[in-house]
Amino acid sequence: MLPSIFYHCTNTDHGPVLECKRLAPKCTSAKEPKTPRLCVAPSVAQCFAARLFDVAPVHVYRTKDKRCGIAPVDVWDRCVTNERWLIPPMQLVKHGTVPKGVVELVTKHARRAACIKRGFTLHLRVCQYAVAAEFLGTSKDKRRAARCLEALKIQCPYGYFRTVILDAASALTHKSI
């Protein structure tokens, strides 16, 4: 990937500058290395595809200059999120804040579906990206999300979320009868 501006989103407001220290990540899958790093993405929508934020304001930080990020190792969803790793120490500047109401709109369907599935699948991650792109994405995000949906034969991300939720409800009803 060519040098680019990268974004990092967090529920914590670090003020106008985020001072990144060299720390191992708190939440990783069993396969992921404990490499001290900062997870970033080329767009805010891709940050929202990478994780479900608390329903609270999300503070968006970006690199001051274009950087080359490291392609992650053993991160199953990087084909959707385009996640990269930056190795601290470094500073990121505040780009803006996504209001709580928008965070809730972007994450509520994925939150329910992920709870039912007990985690994310590639299909859920792509749907989350499509919804994030709709509200927070660039035109490039919207085109990329549409290609991802098409590749997985998903016509509508909301319809896919609804199907996951209704299928789980139907399975529970059949178990209790």
Image (cartoon, helix red, strand yellow):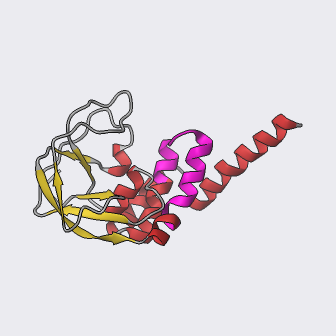
Identify the image quadrant of residue 116. Answer: top right
Give the x, y percent position of residue 100.
45, 69
Q: Is residue 101 left or right of residue 24?
A: right
Q: Nearer the viewer, residue 29 or 164?
A: 29
Q: Nearer the viewer, residue 157 or 30?
A: 30
At x 46%, y 60%, the residue is 130
Q: Is residue 123 left or right of residue 71?
A: right
Depicted 116 relative to depicted 67: above or below = above
Depicted 23 relative to depicted 157: above or below = above
The kind of secondary structure the magenta stretch mainly shows is helix
Identify the image quadrant of residue 11. Answer: bottom left
Is 106 magenta? The answer is yes
Q: How many marks?
A: 0
At x 59%, y 41%, the residue is 117
Give the quadrant of the C terminus.
top right
At x 22%, y 42%, the residue is 71
At x 32%, y 66%, the residue is 140
Instruction: Determine the residue located farthest toward the right in the rendered image.
Output: 177
- Work out whether residue 63 can be spotted: yes
Depicted 59 relative to depicted 120: above or below = below
Is 108 magenta? The answer is yes
- Work out whether residue 149 can be spotted: no
**What's the magenta region?**
105-126
Q: Nearer the viewer, residue 1 or 107?
A: 107
